[in-house]
Image (cartoon, rainbow, N blue to C red):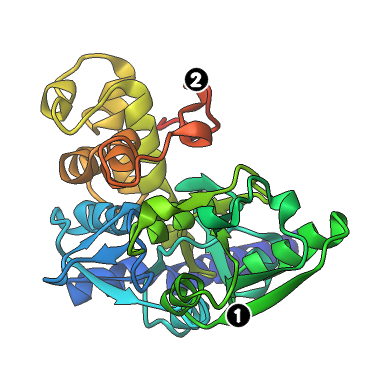
């Protein structure tokens, strides 16, 4: 029995040692004094810089919320613009701490890239953008069309599956970046531009005459978009996913950027746990007890983030749809903070 006990003790010690050795990202970020966040090269509503280099978008706000938790300062983020092709390499190599770049969660990506998805920031689906002059009202009318698509995305496989299942022919014209793809579409090199519907709305804003183009009604795939972190650091994985969960839970609880200070004074048990006045949930994540307060004061809840970037308060004006909370007709849902 002593031998078995000794083996168990050694195994436990090795396991704890491995866990401690791998939990380095939070310390690295803290020591550096800056979060390195991989984003797109410019997608309005998700991650896009203005002419002064100030970044905005849902993906940007997620990283700012993480920085708010760690530093109590949402500005302590370095945004690294990445192409679809280069985004995973940048995460794997350690160039970035988190990839927050309109990336679809799939089984193959979850298992083959040495990385974990931490949640869904936006439930999307692939669609088609066409010139109204073509007088096409449905994707089923696109037989023999030439279609512009960006390489290194899930869009290529979805496109092939859709046209094959509907016995239609098409010509692929592929490009390495979103800008190249959109420019090719606008110049007439292809009839159709395909991408996630959210991206179609965003890219349409860049066209010379956005009103001359329409997004067709068909959505041909599931595209749950979310942040990614490297395998091997469960502490960092937990922290990044719970930052997003906290924003979703805050909306459900009615906590907003405007009322957060008053809500933090509540005697309700659930709110006391959320704001750290009862328990040590923040410390279990490796941060301070007031971690949720920091997030909401800096970036607001999930609904506020959605509205200002892609929803009613933005130029995109996209309806919440599936991204509405689960108790309001959507499927956006987070585990409880308890």
Residue name at image x 30 percent, y 43 percent? 282
Q: Residue at x 20, y 53 (%)?
A: 68
Question: Does residue 141 appear in this view?
Answer: yes
Residue plotted at (21% across, 14% down):
267
Q: Position of residue 167 (x, y in %)?
A: 88, 59
Residue at the disc numbered 1: 174
- Give the quadrant of residue 248: top left
Question: Is residue 144 toward the left or the right of residue 51 in the image?
Answer: right
In the orientation shown, which residue stands out farthest toward the top? Answer: 268
Quarter of the picture containing the N terminus is: bottom right
Please tell me how crowded label 2 is: few (under 14), some (14-19), or many (20+) other residues with Cα within 10 Å.
few
Residue 6 in sight from this viewpoint: no
Which quadrant of the view contains residue 170? bottom right
Q: Is residue 181 left or right of residue 41?
A: right
- Give the Cα distance between marks 1 and 2: 40 Å
Q: Secondary structure at mark 2?
A: helix
Residue position for label 2: 327
């Amino acid at each position: 029995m002593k031998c078995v006990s000794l083996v168990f003790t050694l195994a436990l010690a090795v396991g704890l040692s491995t866990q401690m050795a791998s939990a380095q990202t939070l310390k690295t970020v803290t020591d550096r004094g800056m979060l390195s966040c991989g984003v797109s090269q410019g997608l309005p509503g998700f991650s896009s810089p203005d002419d002064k280099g100030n970044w905005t978008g849902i993906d940007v706000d997620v990283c700012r919320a993480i920085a708010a938790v760690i530093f109590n300062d949402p500005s302590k983020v370095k945004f690294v613009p990445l192409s679809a092709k280069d985004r995973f390499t940048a995460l794997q190599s350690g160039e970035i701490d988190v990839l927050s770049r309109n990336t679809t969660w799939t089984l193959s990506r979850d298992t083959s890239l040495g990385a974990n998805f931490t949640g869904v920031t936006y439930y999307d689906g692939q669609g088609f953008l066409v010139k109204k002059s073509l007088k096409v009202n449905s994707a089923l009318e696109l037989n023999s069309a030439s279609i512009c698509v960006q390489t290194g995305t899930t869009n290529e496989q979805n496109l092939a599956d859709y046209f094959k299942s509907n016995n239609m022919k098409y010509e692929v014209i592929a490009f390495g970046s979103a800008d190249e793809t959109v420019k090719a579409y606008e110049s007439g090199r292809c009839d159709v531009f395909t991408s996630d519907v959210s991206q179609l709305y965003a890219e349409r804003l860049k066209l010379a005459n956005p009103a001359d183009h329409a997004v067709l009604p068909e959505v041909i795939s599931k595209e749950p978009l979310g942040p990614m972190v490297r395998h091997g650091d469960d502490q960092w994985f937990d922290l990044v996913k719970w930052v997003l969960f906290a924003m979703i839970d805050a909306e459900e609880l009615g906590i907003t950027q405007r009322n957060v200070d008053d809500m933090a004074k509540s005697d309700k048990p659930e709110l006391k746990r959320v704001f750290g006045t009862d328990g040590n949930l923040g410390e279990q994540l490796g941060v301070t007890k007031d971690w949720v307060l920091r997030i909401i004061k800096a970036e607001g809840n999930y609904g506020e983030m959605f509205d200002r970037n892609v929803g009613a308060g933005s130029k995109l004006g996209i309806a919440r749809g599936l991204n509405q909370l689960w108790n309001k007709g959507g499927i956006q849902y987070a585990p409880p903070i308890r």
